[in-house]
Image: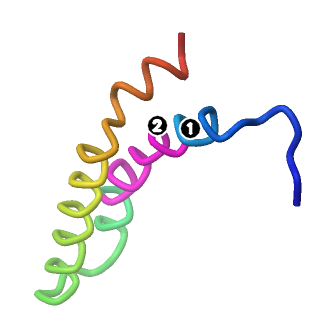
């Protein structure tokens, strides 16, 4: 599929900005299920990995660029 008028730079900024969703959604999803040792470890790993992703992509900088 070809999308006209949506360049790589803009796509990359949006990808970086939207990386925050992985971190934001970890918490509400984790409280909606029964707590188990294995499940808690999985959600902990998800949160750590999502936070690492946010930092590596400099998500907050991208958010400023997308919203201004």
Quarter holding the N terminus? bottom right
Image point (54%, 17%), residue name: 67
**Badge 2 local density, few (<14 within 10 Å), some, or many (20+)?**
many
Q: For the view shown, which residue lies furthest in the top direction?
A: 68
Mark 1 surroundings within 10 Å by alpha-carbon count, few (fewer than 14), some (14 through 19), many (20 or more): some
Residue 20 versus residue 28: which sits nearer the camera?
Answer: 20
| Element carrying mark 1 | helix
Find out whether residue 16 is within the magenta segment. Answer: yes
The location of residue 6, given as percent across then percent down, is 77, 36
Q: Is residue 50 above or below residue 12?
A: below
Q: In the image, is 4 to the left or to the right of 52?
A: right
Callouts 1 and 2 close, C-beta under 8 Å: yes
Q: Which residue is mark 2?
A: 17
Q: Which residue is mark 1?
A: 14
> Could you tell me residue 3's position as x and y percent?
86, 46
Quarter of the figure that contains the C terminus: top right
Instruction: Return the x and y of residue 30 as percentages of the image width and height.
Output: 30, 67
- Secondary structure, mark 2, is helix
Q: In the image, 5: left or right of 45?
A: right
Residue 21 vertical placement versus 61 (above, below): below
Is 15 a magenta residue?
A: yes
45 left or right, relative to 23: left
Q: Residue at x 52, y 35 (%)?
A: 13
Magenta-colored span: 14-26
Residue 16 position (above or below residue 44): above
Please state if 44 lies on the left or on the right of 32 as rendered. Answer: left
Please name the residue shown 11% across and 87% down the image.
37
Give the residue drawn at x 16%, y 69%: 44
Name the residue nearer the viewer: 65 or 9.
Answer: 9
Find the distance from the CA under tag 1 to the CA under tag 2: 5 Å
Q: Give the number of callouts.
A: 2
Asked where in the image residue 47 lies, by quadrant, the reply is bottom left
């Amino acid at each position: 599929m070809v999308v006209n008028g949506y360049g790589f730079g803009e796509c990359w900024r949006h990808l970086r900005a939207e990386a925050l969703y992985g971190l934001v959604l970890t918490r509400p999803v984790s409280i909606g299920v029964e707590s188990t040792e294995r499940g808690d470890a999985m959600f902990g790993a998800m949160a750590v990995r999502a936070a690492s992703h946010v930092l590596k992509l400099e998500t907050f900088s991208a958010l400023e660029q997308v919203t201004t």
